[in-house]
Amino acid sequence: MATFDAAKIDQDAAEREMLEALEAEDPFAGLVPVEAKIGKNLTDLVTFRMRSEEFQEIDRAASREGMSLSEFIRRSALTRAREAEGLPSLTPSLVDTLDQLTKQYQDLRRKPRGSRARSKANAT
């Protein structure tokens, strides 16, 4: 009596399906369509090397300023980049104010319209 290996049969079927898709020259054959939402605030992850002494110095400065290390490096790099372009650099207090205003604006945009009206009435 012959025995069958179900896993081997499934694997063979999957391989045949992949080969048929390649032969049909349809790169999307066999894929399942899905809906995806892409966020507005896309970010890039940046990695770089630095000496341990440099890292410790930057980390201490970030702590003194009450910032995360990444925020301190981002702001410092942007300040230097803007100076190099001849653009005005923003003071940390102005950046903080702009960040707070942006967050408040985004929070207001997320609220339903009726709750905005109630918020305005409560504020007065």
Image (cartoon, rainbow, N blue to C red):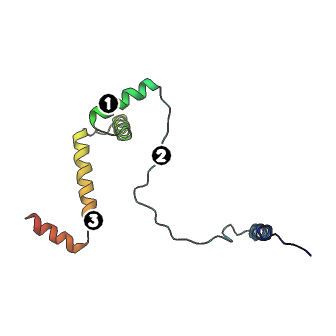
Q: Secondary structure at mark 1?
A: helix
Q: State whether residue 99 is above or below residue 24.
A: above
Residue 2 position in % (x across, y down): 90, 74
Label 1 vs 3, first from the N-terminus: 1
- Disc 3 residue crowd, few under 14, some 14–19, many 20+, Cα 10 Å: few
Q: Which residue is mark 3?
A: 109
Q: Secondary structure at mark 2?
A: loop
Q: Nearer the viewer, residue 31 or 2?
A: 2
| Tag 2: amino acid | Leu
Horizontal side of residue 76 vs 1, given as left or right:
left
Asked whether the beta carbons under mark 1 and mark 3 sit within 8 Å of each other, the answer is no
Q: Which residue is mark 2?
A: 45
Asked whether the beta carbons under mark 1 and mark 2 sit within 8 Å of each other, the answer is no
Asked whether the beta carbons under mark 3 and mark 2 sit within 8 Å of each other, the answer is no
Q: Which residue is mark 1?
A: 61
Label 1 vs 2, first from the N-terminus: 2
Q: Quadrant of the N terminus?
A: bottom right
Label 3 vs 2, first from the N-terminus: 2
